[in-house]
Image: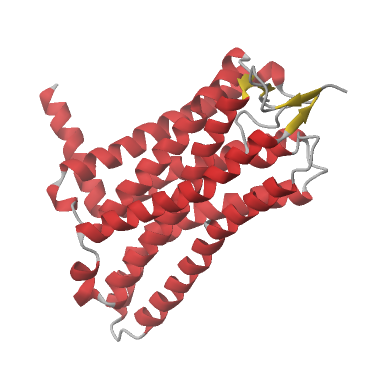
Amino acid sequence: MLVFNSTNAPPLIFFLTGIPGLRAGQVWISIPFCLLYVIALSGNSMILLVVLREQSLHEPMYYFLCMLSATDLSLSLCTLSTTLGVLWFEAREINLNACIAQMFFLHGFTFMESGVLLAMAFDRFVAICDPLRYDTILTNARIAQIGVIMLIRNVAVVLPVVLFVKRLTFCSSLVLSHSYCYHVDLIQLSCTDNRINSILGLFALFSTTGFDCPCILLSYILIIRSVLSIASSEERRKAFNTCVSHISAVAIFYIPLISLSLIHRYGHSAPPFVHTIMANVFLLIPPVLNPIIYSVKTKQIRKAIIRILFQKQRQI
């Protein structure tokens, strides 16, 4: 059995996987994937452009939406080159250093999205439960502080996870299960003790999404209690409507994440391509749907997009 030490030069070469069992049809399968990437990149870029250009949208809620769109944009770009490279050109090789870099950004932006959703939940909590102090609590400086804290948290949590991969020794099997580098997938190929890596990975998961999700649930319990105390049914409806977009964003982030975890744990009898498609869908669903949801459900965003599009048509 061949053994490869990841600390030796030159860097190890791993092999990414397209769609197992459907290799002949990968070019055709790549078309919907490509379309999803185009929607994700253009949709999130449009949200960023609209919020930055429109003075009326320079409010805390839309600043957090900008953070979400920037995170979704970055998350899409993390896997774009390797996924389409594998599906289009059979470009399956990736060296260990590139793999570690992709893992850092992939997991970092995933955890960042969870943190942004928590910040948006806090925004809705303050807006509904303490509206008179909304502007004094969520100042521009405080929003910037929240963004920096989330960034520092993610770097501090993810950096040890990916750096400890360098200490592993890999055996003759260097074939990954996805079209991108995923921490759990990579450490399973190690032929040495990877318990430290598993513990670090679990710590990263529980200290980010594991902390954020209960906090989001708690904020909505408090929001619901506050809304139900409002006497007017019309005011209750308006208050709930301001939360619909965020609740949808939370659902499309956490439901695929939980589904993917369940399939990895209990879906051993499922065909390999199910795992691969689910893994790619998990990464693409939030960046694709978030801009659509906020454009449809948020009147101010919808009007601003229409205004910008009509301005461009007049220029043409």
Q: Residue furthest front?
A: 8
Q: Quadrant of the C terminus?
A: top left
Residue 177: percent from the left, percent from the top?
70, 32
Can residue 248 be seen in this snapshot? yes
Does residue 280 appear left or right of residue 69 in this picture? right
Colour pattern: secondary structure
Q: Position of residue 92 (x, y in %)?
A: 64, 18
Viewer-closest of 209 and 251:
209
Question: In percent of the image, x 32 and y 64: which residue is there?
Answer: 123
Q: Residue at x 24, y 69 (%)?
A: 137
Answer left or right for 38 relative to 180.
Answer: left
Say if 117 sits above or below 80 in the image: below
Residue in view at x 59 percent, y 36 percent: 280
Residue drawn at the location 70% of the way across and 29% of the way down: 176
The quarter of the rendered structure image containing the N terminus is top right
Place of residue 204 in the rendered image (x, y in percent of width and height, measured from the top left): 57, 53
Residue 147 in the image: above or below residue 4: below
| Res. 244 visible in picture | no
Residue most extreme to the top: 89
The image quadrant that residue 276 belongs to is top right
Residue 255 in the image: above or below residue 131:
above
- What percent of the width, then of the height, locates residue 185? 69, 37
Residue 226 appears left or right of 102: left
Number of callouts in the render? Answer: 0
